[in-house]
C-alpha cells in the first residue's frame, strides 16, 4: 500500500514509512531529520498545540485528521508542558496562520523545539488504514529517503507495549504549584497536564506536585488531604513501583483520584486487568455515558490502553462511565476505599464543559473523608482548552 500527496507549500521532501510497508511521500514540516514511534491519530478539529505538548503522547507520532493544522499559529498560552512531547507530527496541510494572538507560526514553533514532521499526507486515508490494521510503529524522515532502510527502522522501533515512559516526562523534583484556602492535594506526576493542575487551583486547593517515583512516606509528611495520580505515557503494566505506591496510598484511607494512566494504575493496584487496545481513543468528541445520571458527556480522550471490564470484581469497584462507541470502561468508583478514577480527561474542554464536575466530586469526597472546608465551587473558564 502506498500513498503520495503534495502540499501547497514548497518544502524539502519527506517520507512516512509504516512497519507494515506502507509508504507515504510528503514534504518536511518543522525540524529536518528522522524520528519514529507508535503511529496514532487525533480527530480534534482544534487544540493541536495542546495535543503536541500533552505528556501522554510522549514517544508517539501524532497524525491529525483535521486538514488544516497550524492555521492559528502557536502561542505560549496553549502549552500543556514546557515543550512538545510527541515524537513527530503528521498533517495534511499547514497553511499560513491568521491569528493576531499567535506568538509564531507552527513551522517556527516546531523548528525551535526540534520537532520533526511531515505535511502533504492524506491523513484521513491513512487513519482508515490504521483503524483496520491496528496501531503500529512508523518513522518520519526528511534526511534519508531510502524506503527499505526506513521500513526496517520502523520495524525495529521499540513497541509501546511493555514500555515504561512516565519517568521520562515526570517532574525532576517536588514543587508547590499553587497555594489556596482549600484542601491540600498531592499530585503524583506521571506526565500531568497543566490544565489538571489549574483545575485544582480553580477550586482553591493547595497543590504539591511530586515525581512519579516519590516514596509515599515523603508525600504523607506534607499531610495532604487527598492524592491524585496523573495521566502519562506508556504501558502501565510494567510500572510495578507506581502500582505499589497506589496500593500503599489505598491503605492510608486518604481519598484518591486518578485520570487516564492514573486510572489504570489504580485499577491494577486493585487486581483489575489492563489491555492494549487495537486502536486507541484520541479526540475531542467521544461520547461517554454517566451510568448514574444517564447523561451523555462529550469528552476529550487520549489513551491506547484500557481497563478490562471482565476483570472487575463487584466487591472491588463499579463502572460509573462507559464509552458509547465501543462500551469501554471510562470511569470507576472503588468499593473498599474512597477512590474514583476516569479514563478520559475531565480537565479538557472540547467546546462543552461537560466533565468538569468530576473535580467537584473529588472535592466533595475529600470533604466527606477529611475535616476540611471547601471554598466556593469554581467557575470554569469560558475559553475551550484541550
Image (cartoon, grey):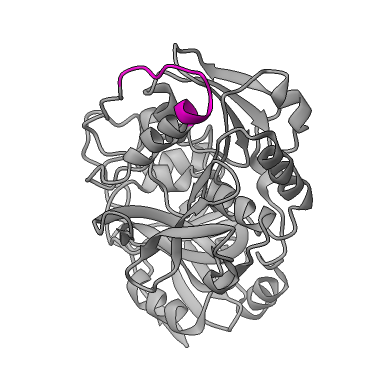
x and y percent of residue 35 in the render? Answer: 61, 58
Horizontal side, residue 369 vs residue 325: left or right: right
Q: Is residue 224 above or below residue 214?
A: above
Please tell me whether residue 2 is drawn above or below residue 347 in the rendered image: below
Identified at 36% across, 17% down, the residue is 375
Front position in the image: 189 or 105:
189
Image x and y of residue 269, in percent:
68, 53
Residue at 25% from the left image edge and 26% from the top image edge: 379
Q: Determine the main secondary structure of the stretch shown in magenta.
A: loop
How many marks on residues? 0
Residue 118 visible, this orientation: no
Where is residue 281? Give x, y as percent.
Answer: 43, 64
Task: Give the vertical position of 194 relative to 293 (above or below).
Answer: above
Residue 229 in view of the camera: yes
- Image quadrant containing the C terminus: top left
Residue 381 placement: quadrant:
top left
Q: Magenta stretch?
A: 366-376
- In screen coordinates, is 246 left or right of 96? right
Amino acid at each position: 500500500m502506498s500513498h503520495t500527496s503534495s502540499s501547497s507549500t514548497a518544502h524539502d521532501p519527506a517520507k512516512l514509512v509504516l512497519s507494515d510497508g506502507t509508504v507515504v511521500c510528503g514534504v518536511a514540516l518543522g525540524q529536518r531529520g528522522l524520528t519514529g514511534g507508535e503511529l496514532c491519530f487525533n480527530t480534534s478539529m482544534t487544540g493541536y498545540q495542546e495535543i503536541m505538548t500533552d505528556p501522554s503522547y510522549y514517544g508517539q507520532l501524532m497524525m491529525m485528521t483535521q486538514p488544516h493544522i497550524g492555521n492559528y499559529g502557536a502561542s505560549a498560552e496553549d502549552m500543556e508542558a514546557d515543550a512538545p512531547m510527541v515524537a513527530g507530527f503528521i498533517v495534511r496541510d499547514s497553511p499560513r496562520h491568521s491569528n493576531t494572538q499567535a506568538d509564531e507560526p507552527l513551522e517556527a514553533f516546531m523548528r525551535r523545539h526540534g520537532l520533526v514532521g511531515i505535511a502533504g499526507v492524506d491523513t484521513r486515508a491513512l487513519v482508515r488504514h490504521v483503524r483496520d490494521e491496528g496501531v503500529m510503529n512508523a518513522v518520519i524522515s526528511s534526511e534519508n529517503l531510502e524506503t527499505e532502510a526506513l521500513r526496517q527502522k520502523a520495524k525495529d522501533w521499540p513497541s509501546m507495549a511493555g514500555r515504561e515512559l512516565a519517568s521520562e516526562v515526570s517532574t525532576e523534583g517536588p514543587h508547590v504549584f499553587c497555594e489556596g484556602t482549600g484542601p491540600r492535594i498531592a499530585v503524583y506526576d506521571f506526565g500531568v497536564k497543566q490544565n489538571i493542575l489549574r483545575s485544582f487551583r480553580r477550586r482553591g486547593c493547595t497543590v504539591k506536585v511530586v515525581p512519579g517515583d516519590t516514596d509515599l512516606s515523603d508525600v504523607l509528611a506534607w499531610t495532604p488531604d487527598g492524592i491524585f495520580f496523573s495521566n502519562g505515557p506508556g504501558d502501565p503494566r510494567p510500572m510495578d513501583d507506581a502500582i505499589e505506591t497506589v496500593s500503599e496510598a489505598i491503605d492510608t484511607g486518604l481519598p484518591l483520584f486518578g485520570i487516564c494512566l492514573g486510572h489504570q494504575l489504580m485499577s491494577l493496584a486493585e487486581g483489575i486487568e489492563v489491555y492494549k487496545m487495537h486502536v486507541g481513543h484520541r479526540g475531542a468528541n467521544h461520547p461517554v455515558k454517566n451510568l448514574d445520571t444517564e447523561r451523555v458527556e462529550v469528552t476529550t480522550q487520549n489513551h491506547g490502553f484500557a481497563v478490562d471490564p471482565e476483570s472487575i470484581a463487584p466487591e472491588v469497584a463499579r463502572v460509573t462511565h462507559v464509552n458509547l462507541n465501543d462500551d469501554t470502561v471510562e470511569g470507576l468508583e472503588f468499593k473498599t476505599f474512597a477512590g474514583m478514577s476516569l479514563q478520559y480527561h475531565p480537565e479538557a474542554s472540547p467546546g462543552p464543559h461537560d466533565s468538569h464536575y468530576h473535580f467537584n466530586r473529588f472535592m466533595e469526597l475529600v470533604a466527606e473523608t477529611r475535616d476540611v472546608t471547601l471554598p466556593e465551587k469554581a467557575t470554569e473558564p469560558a475559553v475551550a482548552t484541550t
